[in-house]
Image (cartoon, grey):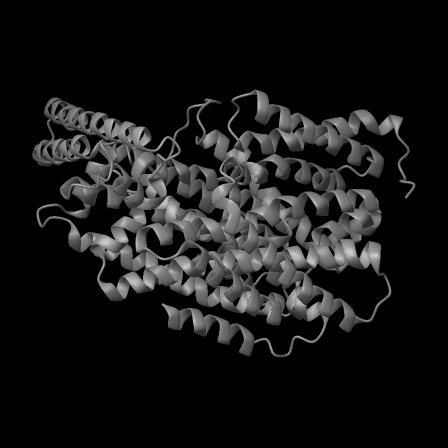
Amino acid sequence: MQSKEKEIIDADESTPPILGSWTKVYALVFGNLIFLILMFYLFTKVFE
Amino acid sequence: MLGFLAFVVIYGIMKTRGTKDVDSYIRAGRKTPWWTITLSIMATQASAITFLSTPGQAYVDGMRFVQFYLGLPIAMIILSITAVPLYNKLNVYTAYEYLETRFDLKNRTLGSILFLSQRGLAAGFTIYAPALILSVILGWQLDLTILIIGFTVILYTTVGGTVAVNKTHILQMIIITVGMFSSFVIIYFLLPDDISVIDAAYVAGKLGKLNAIDFSFDLSNRYTFWSGIIGGTFLMLSYFGTDQSQVQRYLAGSSIKESRMGLLVNGLVKVPMQFIILFIGAMVFVLYQFVTPPLFFNPVEEQNVKNSIYSEEYIELEKDYDRIFKEKQVKIREMLSAIESGSEIEITEKTNDVLAKQEEATIVREKAIDLIKETNPDADTNDTNFIFITYITTFLPIGLIGLVLAAILSASMSSTSAELNALASTTVIDIYKRMIKKDAADSHYLKVSKLSTILWGIYAIVFALFASQLGSLVEAVNILGSLVYGTILGIFLVAFYFKRIGGNASFYAALIAELVVLYCYLFTNIPFLWYNVIGCLSVIILAFILNPFLPKKAEV
């Protein structure tokens, strides 16, 4: 079962439509989250 | 609005005339592009009650609710790496099918029964809650509203299955976006001429409504950065990774790439979208600083008091409330002048004046709520859900009211259709085909799927029709998701990541974990978001403890 599932994951070699690799797309989503948290924090502090 | 409803049904049916087998019906033939998946995922999650409640929540409690969604992008990344490739390559129709591949039949059955039990009741609530609010505000008959929403959804979901759900989700998301955008633009024009958007933001901020991020670690505080990022990640992992109403959306993807992009784009846009909806609520709050709001936003309860012996007392409170708001408006303008001058001492002094007026208004409102309770001890004293719809019906022009009501009905139908679609799929694939009739023709399963959609639809409508008489059960449905999501997620995480754990250990660990979560709900004050963490970690830890003592292969 373990090797079968690993094969399944490894077999996914399709590239994303943007940025060239999935790692970069994941980094974009995570980076966007960090950016939003910082913006929300600034937003909270500026207007409080 | 009625034209829009009719258009959705005809569009859903017209676009799905090719649905002739189970694969087309449940997974849309696996031909769905990523952008349709994104819209469908968002439309499934955005129920009408979310759409009605979220701005009201910002009005009452500020924007801190946005932290509830902070775990969502992280969950999207984890699911894109793990669940999407596995589900896709194992060619499953439901998430629970995977549990039998990995463990055994009893784990699959437990997962599907936990899903069916909570989602079946939730589908009824998804119809009932907005129907109740619309009937109270617009004077529509509640039962008729429930029947119209329910049977409209049953019609196109039964005929077209997942393709119809996905296609109508696109239309529904467009109308929801246009509706919300219009509501926001109108607030801008309704604010007094001397109050800019920045001034409005300062008013909201100084009165505690722009509290988007709170880094304090406080277990008794429901929405903080930590509960959102930790509890929210577990909840979203469970919701998007194991709840068939969401899993079915990306199982319809034409490839791993399309399913992943569908989830990841949702991870990019969902948090800002919720922020905007909450900001609209904060701006409605500011608008109501310059126009005295109703003392209580639920017009039925308010009318009940005015028809009772407390009428005069209530009208006096209304006058007091109006006077306090007029005085408060003067103080707010003084505060804005102080902010413009930049003098910190003056800003603090004037802000305290405004807060004092706010406190006075709160005391008057509490007295009004006491009168409502005196009039009717069973009255619902929480009017948060009525705030946004009151703003819509009071301030928007007739055409736009129709547009926003269409958006609210869209949100109700989009969530309900995805729920019925998923309930039918799980019933047919995990219960009927697996345990009752294994080797029938594809056309037979297609008929059973359609029949199952109708039956779950009727079940949801019946629940919605009787919901008002069930009282506490309705409240229970609201938190039922968090009572079972952690356990389901635990089973899936053990399946994904802990290969040494067998089916028996996973199954019994899940049963005990569910008891632990129920104990927390019944006997502690832990906020519900943490149930997801507790349930999930309990399954994992107990599975490790039980695994050496139990045979790995199930004897089923």
Q: Is B379 on the left or on the right of B353, as rendered?
A: right
Number of numbered discs on residues? 0
Q: Is residue B33 above or below residue B131?
A: below
Determine the residue positioned at 91% across, 33% down. Answer: B551
Q: Is residue B384 above or below residue B520?
A: below
Quarter-of-image position of residue B386: top left
Q: Is residue A13 above or below residue B199?
A: below
Give the image location of residue B3, x and y in percent.
Answer: 38, 73
Q: Is residue A11 visible?
A: no
Determine the residue positioned at 67% across, 59% down. Answer: B424
B362 and B70: which is toward the camera: B362
What is the quadrant of the N terminus of chain B in the image? Answer: bottom left
Quarter-of-image position of residue B456: bottom right
Determine the residue positioned at 22% across, 25% down. Answer: B363
Q: Is residue A29 visible?
A: yes
Give the image location of residue B262, x and y in percent.
Answer: 55, 58
What is the quadrant of the C terminus of chain B in the image? Answer: top right
B84 and B486: which is toward the camera: B486
Give the image location of residue B76, x and y in percent.
Answer: 57, 48
B364 and B529: which is toward the camera: B364
Q: Is B196 on the left or on the right of B529, as rendered?
A: left
Give the image location of residue B300, x and y in percent.
Answer: 30, 44
Residue lying farthest front? Answer: B309
